[in-house]
Amino acid sequence: MILYEGLENIPAPFAETTVAIGTFDGVHVGHQAIIRTAVEDARTHGRPALVFTFDRHPAELLRPTEAPPYITTPRQRNRLIEQLGVDILVIARFDTALANLGHEEFVERILVGLCGAKAIVEGRDFCFGKGRAGNLAYLLSVQAHYGFKVHAVDPVFVNGVPASSTRVRECLRLGDITEAEAVLGHPFWMEGRVVPGQRLGRKLGYPTANLVPTYRQVVPADGIYAVWVCMTQGGDLLPGVCSIGERPTIEGAGRAIEVYLFDFEGDLYDQILEVRFVRRLRDEVRFDSLDALQAQMARDVAEAREVLRGIPDSSSA
């Protein structure tokens, strides 16, 4: 897959492509249906499949206080798009100039003039251009004029409800990993950098890696999770337990995201880890003593080992 970050970095207009357009945060099953439709159309007509997306959610610029957290980092999103067989990925910088571009000009200058669109694939609710004035009805009205074919992809339903990025975020906020993965169609991975902590886990016999998210990703509900962990600099997937929350048993410990890796020895400081949340084991609980906490941690580890034994580690980040 050829990646262009910024429209100015495209050396010359494409001759002809099939374009799938959207924000594609999470690349969930609905997004996958749109992209696969574009890839199939491109293969049928012997032209490249091009995904056109943005470097940020438009709300970050237009309504920053309402901007949702991301499901995927840019690297994760790009990787998922590539796995669907896309030939070209164009990531436009969503700045004031692009936000103020009218929908007619967006189609003429960018989709047709730059991307060479001979077919355009999008979800039925997708809007574009200044004030979100461009939509499916507009594209259908001008397809004959510009010589492209419009393909509208219906929503994909999961357990009777349409798949959406909003639904994935809500599932994760509730700690419902199973439902989130069903809507995504792939595992959820949170990326974080290992930073020095208070070494509280080490004192209890369970040394943990303290993570600070590297990107503004949604964080699952507080609690204890069975996880797979991938080191982005290479290496095997490792099983473990992740704790998210305020660590109420230890006075003044404060909020943290901590990962305990089973049977691991080594220095993880400053490394980037990706954590796949597999199952939420329990709520965060305040214990009467450190001994009681330590005993519960042993039970958590045993339960997580059992859970992960049935979940293959082949779904890498």
Image: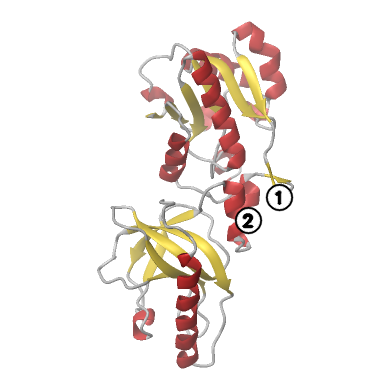
Q: Contact (CB < 8 A) between labels 2 and 1?
A: yes
The residue at 48%/71% (across/down) is 306
Q: Which mark is residue 76?
A: none
Quarter of the figure with the N terminus: top left
CA neighbours of label 2 inside 10 A, class few (<14), some (14 to 19), many (20+): some
Q: Is residue 151 visible?
A: yes
| In the rendered image, the vertical position of residue 63 relative to residue 38, given as above or below | below
Displayed quadrant of residue 265: bottom left
Residue 69 position in % (x across, y down):
55, 51
| In the rendered image, the vertical position of residue 298 relative to residue 274, given as above or below | below
> Please, what secondary structure does the residue beneath circle 1 have?
loop
Q: Extreme front residue here?
A: 310
The residue at 34%/79% (across/down) is 199
Lower position in the chain sequence, tag 2 or tag 1:
1
Q: Is residue 99 visible?
A: no
Residue 247 position in % (x across, y down):
50, 78
Report which residue position mark 1 lands on.
159
Q: What colour scheme does the image use?
A: secondary structure
Which of 7 and 143 lies nearest the eye of the viewer? 143
Report which residue position mark 2 lands on.
179
Residue 192 position in % (x across, y down):
40, 58
Which of 266 and 23 lies nearest the eye of the viewer? 266
Please state if 237 lies on the left or on the right of 45 as rendered. Answer: left
Which of 312 and 138 lies nearest the eye of the viewer? 312
The three-letter code of the residue at mark 1 reads: Asn
The three-letter code of the residue at mark 2 reads: Glu
